Image (cartoon, rainbow, N blue to C red):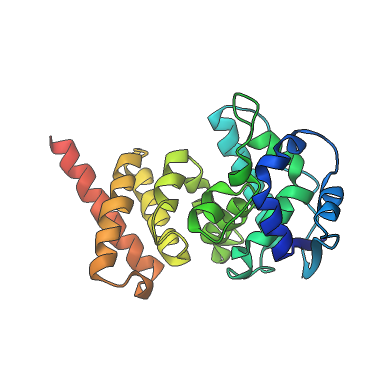
């Protein structure tokens, strides 16, 4: 399939009218065409030249946190496998692309995956994307899948398991949140280095080490980046820096 995207005017108009249209999202009616015609925007969606593999459906097996983490991981693998090599980070930062995919191609999935206990969905967060880091990495229902795959997939391990770091990222929601909350979280090199360090710590200690990882992301790496240039480091250098810090922190905690 060729990827769809909203025109800029259509995106802005639809976003402005969230409150007016909110009830329509909870119906099975295809209402977009009629809505945009009333706004004098009949050509609201365009077909890009980017061709990707078809995705028949995303996985959704349960409402509990463990099921959602497991489903997210599988859906990342599904989407990124089909999209891999087709989008640049610049293209994947376009809110018109992800907003269109949420509204047209994957609407049913978005409504099911992100329904809250009261039956509602945070429409502005899950259906719309912005150019902000938090929206692209964490909130928009579809862009978060692509970016999680892009930041963690290891091509060099294609013959073994290129998803090792993705599996670490989604082994606990806290890991994803602690990492993606950081200003450096769209830096693929830094993300891979940090997750490789966490993987080593977990394998060596049998400890999930999520509080230590949080401290490493929030305090240590941010401070390190303030006195150094994170962008100049290799993934291996980031890994060693983070691994040494977390190992020292765990050792100090064990002595108390």
Residue furthest out toward the top = 118
Quarter assignment of residue 196: bottom left
Quarter assignment of residue 203: top left
In the picture, measured across the screen, residue 140 lies left or right of residue 42, that is left
In the picture, measured across the screen, residue 86 lies left or right of residue 206, that is right
Quadrant where the N terminus sits is bottom right
Q: Report whether residue 226 is seen.
A: yes
Quadrant where the C terminus sits is top left
Q: Who's the residue at 66% across and 68% down the image?
A: 87
Q: Position of residue 45 (x, y in %)?
A: 80, 61
Q: Position of residue 154 (x, y in %)?
A: 54, 62
Q: Is 214 rendered above or below residue 121?
A: below
Residue furthest out toward the bottom = 232
Q: Position of residue 51 (x, y in %)?
A: 79, 66
In the picture, measured across the screen, residue 209 lies left or right of residue 78, that is left
Q: Is 25 rendered above or below residue 4?
A: above
């Amino acid at each position: 399939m060729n990827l769809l995207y909203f025109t800029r005017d259509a995106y802005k108009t639809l976003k402005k009218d969230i409150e007016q249209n909110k009830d329509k999202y909870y119906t099975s009616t295809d209402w977009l065409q009629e809505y945009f015609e009333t706004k004098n925007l009949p050509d609201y969606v365009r077909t890009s030249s980017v061709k990707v593999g078809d995705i028949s459906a995303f996985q959704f097996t349960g409402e509990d946190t463990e099921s959602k983490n497991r489903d997210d991981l599988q859906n990342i693998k599904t989407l990124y496998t089909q999209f891999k090599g087709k989008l640049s980070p610049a293209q994947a930062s376009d809110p018109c692309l992800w907003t269109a995919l949420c509204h047209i191609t994957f609407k049913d999935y978005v409504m099911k995956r992100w329904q809250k206990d009261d039956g509602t969905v945070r429409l502005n967060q899950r259906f719309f994307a912005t150019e902000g880091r938090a929206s692209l990495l964490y909130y928009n229902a579809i862009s978060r899948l692509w970016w999680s795959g892009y930041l963690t997939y290891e091509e060099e391990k294609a013959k073994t398991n290129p998803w090792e770091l993705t599996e670490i990222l989604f082994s606990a929601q806290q890991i994803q949140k602690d990492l993606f909350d950081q200003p450096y979280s769209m830096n693929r090199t830094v993300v891979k280095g940090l997750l490789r360090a966490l993987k080593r710590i977990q394998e060596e200690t049998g400890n999930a080490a999520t509080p230590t990882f949080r401290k490493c992301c929030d305090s240590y790496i941010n401070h390190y980046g303030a006195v150094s240039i994170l962008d100049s480091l290799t993934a291996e250098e980031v890994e060693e820096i983070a691994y040494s810090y977390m190992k020292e922190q765990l050792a100090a905690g064990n002595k108390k």
